[in-house]
Image (spheres, rainbow, N blue to C red):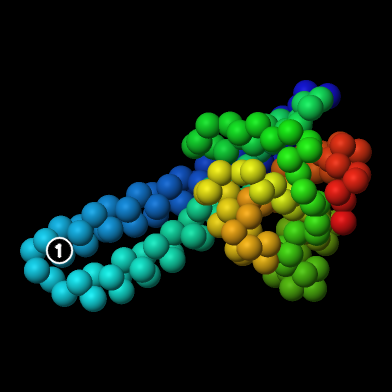
Amino acid sequence: MNKTYAHPRPLLDLITQGTAIVFLATAIALLVVQLVLIVQGVSPLLVFAVSTTLILLTAPALWLLFATPALSVEEDGITLRPRFWSPIRVRWDEVRAVKPYPLLPEKDAEKVRQAMVGRAKFRAAEGIMLVVPSLPIYYRFHGLFVNEGFTGVIAVTNRTHEDYEALVGVLREQLAEVWA
């Protein structure tokens, strides 16, 4: 049963994840610069407004980094394998719910993509999300985007995980009691 389900397009994943890391690092550096500006006498209200904006903009970067990590499936749970962070072990009993993933485009909304890849190769987006309250804080921003509150959530989609049908089959078998 031990198998890892990674992104089907590793280069695209590396570019996306790398861009998110650069954005996050830039935001943190700008926050530090703003602290220096406060010390130098710039209006604290202005610095607060800009800092709040930067903090709010980091949520999408965190979402990109942690929304759909590669997964390794084992007998007693899964291991999340984000590209730039340490793996995190999740036991099956830590998953509180499995639901349809709401952030995927509707089939009719992808006419341009369908035209670009061709009707024969096009496949509508499919996905599920696992609600795991025990996940660290950086996985909880994703919960805000999918209307689960500040709760840990990861997604599994046919565009971000190779062998999607097999992975969903294993998850359905292991998580049948919490499957929505």
Q: In this view, does 52 lie to the left or right of 119?
A: left
**Which residue sits at x=49%, y=37%?**
84
Q: Is residue 156 left or right of residue 144?
A: right
**Which residue sits at x=27%, y=58%?**
30
**Which residue sits at x=79%, y=27%?**
76
Q: Which sits in the foreground, 93 or 99?
A: 93
Q: Which residue lies furthest to the left in this view?
A: 40
Image coords of residue 15 (percent x, y): 50, 46
SS state under label 1: helix
Q: Residue 55 falls in which quadrant of the image?
A: bottom left
Q: Which sits in the foreground, 97 or 53?
A: 97
Name the residue that disc number 1 marks. Answer: 37
- Where the C terminus falls, by quadrant? bottom right
Image coords of residue 169 (percent x, y): 89, 40
Say above or below: 87 vs 57: above
Q: In this view, does 4 lie to the left or right of 137?
A: right
Disc tally is 1
**Which residue sits at x=39%, y=54%?**
23
Residue 135 appears in view: yes
Q: Residue 69 falls in which quadrant of the image?
A: top right
- Where the N terminus falls, by quadrant? top right
Residue 126 appears in view: no
Image coords of residue 118 (percent x, y): 78, 60
Residue type of the residue flagged with mark 1: Leu
Say above or below: 59 vs 69: below
Q: In this view, does 160 lie to the left or right of 86?
A: right
Q: Classify 10 Å Cα crowding around label 1: few (below 14), some (14-19), many (20 and above).
A: some
